[in-house]
Amino acid sequence: MDNPSVWRTSLPAYAVSDLLWPGDHRAGDLFSDAAVVAAMVRVEHAWLTALAEHKIADLTVPDLTGLVAPEDLPQLAIDGESGGNPLIPLLKLLRARLRGRNTAAAGWLHKGLTSQDVIDTAIVLCLRDAHDRIRAGLRSQVGSLSRLADEHRETRMAGRTLTQHAIPIMFGLKAAGWLTGVLDARDQLAAVTFPIQVGGAAGSLAAPAALAGGPGRARELVATTAGQLGLPSREPWHTSRAPVTRIADAFVTCTDAWGRIANDVLVGSRPEVHELIEGAAEGKGGSSAMPNKQNPVHAVLIKRAALAGPPLAALVHAGAAAAVDERPDGGWHVEWATLRTLARRTVVAGAQTAELLAGLRVDTGKMLATLHDARPDIDAEQQSITPGVAPGHPYPGATEEIIDAVLARAAAGPG
């Protein structure tokens, strides 16, 4: 089956709605239990198809999507405890429902694979979906930030270091700095890959080679399966977890960049600063007790994601470092829910950042007033470099060149 969307919609959304993570609904059914089950079923279908195409199994490959119903999900979650992973009860369910409909398929289902092959590859499919959503959000952010940097080349403001006034800068330079972080995240996301993970019981392709009649044909089986899933083929990575740690790191590079923007917006939106204002919307930023407040709620929630992301990626790395033998005892298992949480939160923060930037208002008058009030102290460096220069004389450095370079990089695309 070569239409991934069919598999993604084969079970109802059952979106993971997290009351204590406001905005979680933005991730929809991404990495939900239904999405993970659909991805595992898709991997099993692709393998069956490869077995049939290579004349290893004599069968008509059935449509597996209708074999799992939404009401099966709670019991699958419960039954996963006995074997330590959710695939074992899923296979039992699929085989039971295939018998009587397609006995040959029931017998060949999963033959030559191991649980880790299917779960790893299903996780990769879910991560790829998250990756595509995040990249779409980044494109919107790049557009908004490019506009801000270009429009505010001449907007003077007080630069700040270690919370104190430093030297005069242009707001366009600050926006270009935000954009640089987003472009770094864009490039890192573009560089990650989502390879299939098939190695058999201990990563040697022993069972596939025995079924296919040799190692070369086993590798062809893997390549065919990868093609069915739209994934690149590569050698087994059972205990070499760089594919998932790289993805986790790329997601955190995004939340790092967004957190940096959110921090500036939070400072700039303080009433005593009032240089940056989140776009208003009905009911947005309200308080339960103080009707006078208009909280910068998107920036708050983005900062939250930026704080939560690095520990999640660190946990994925900890699992990779705990890899042992030919299948880790716990180090592998800790990845699953951690990657789901990181992926969903990154998608949510990306959407919130795109909205924040699209609606951000810049109070240029307040910026100029603050700069005026900071004089003459804020001109101290300029006076030390060029004594006697007139107060308020432009001190732009290479601002124009920096903005132009960042905008050119944005326009050039990833890489």
Image (spheres, rainbow, N blue to C red):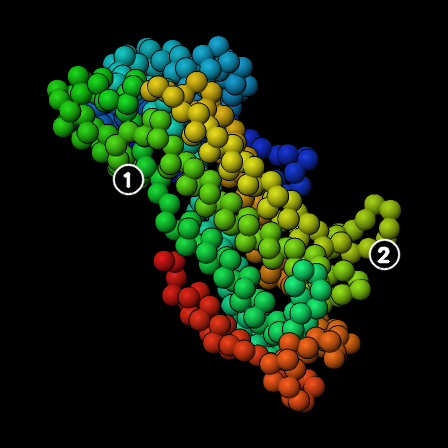
Q: Residue at x 54, y 14 (%)?
A: 78
Q: Which residue is mark 1?
A: 232
Number of numbered tags placed on the structure image: 2
Q: Residues within 10 Å of mark 1 (few under 14, many from 20)?
A: some
Secondary structure under the numbered disc 1 in the rendered image: loop
Give the CA separation, mark 1 to mark 2: 54 Å
Quarter placement of the C terminus: bottom left
Q: Is residue 316 above or below residue 100?
A: below
Q: Is residue 34 above or below residue 3?
A: above
- State the residue at coordinates (75%, 66%): 274
Q: Going by the image, does 249 lie left or right of 362? A: left
Q: Residues within 10 Å of mark 2 (few under 14, many from 20)?
A: few
Drawn side of residue 19 relative to residue 408, left or right: right
What label does residue 292 carry, if any? Answer: 2
Image position, residue 326 (x, y; %) = 33, 20
From the top left corner, tell me how far across and down residue 19 is, in percent: 68, 35
Task: Specify which label sits upstream in the sequence, 1 or 2.
Answer: 1
The image quarter containing residue 213 is top left
What residue is shown at x 60% (from left), y 57% (from top)?
Answer: 261
- Can residue 75 be seen here? The reply is no
Q: Is residue 73 visible?
A: yes
Question: SS for tag 2?
Answer: loop
The quadrant in which residue 26 appears is top right
Q: Are marks 1 and 2 in contact (CB under 8 Å)?
A: no
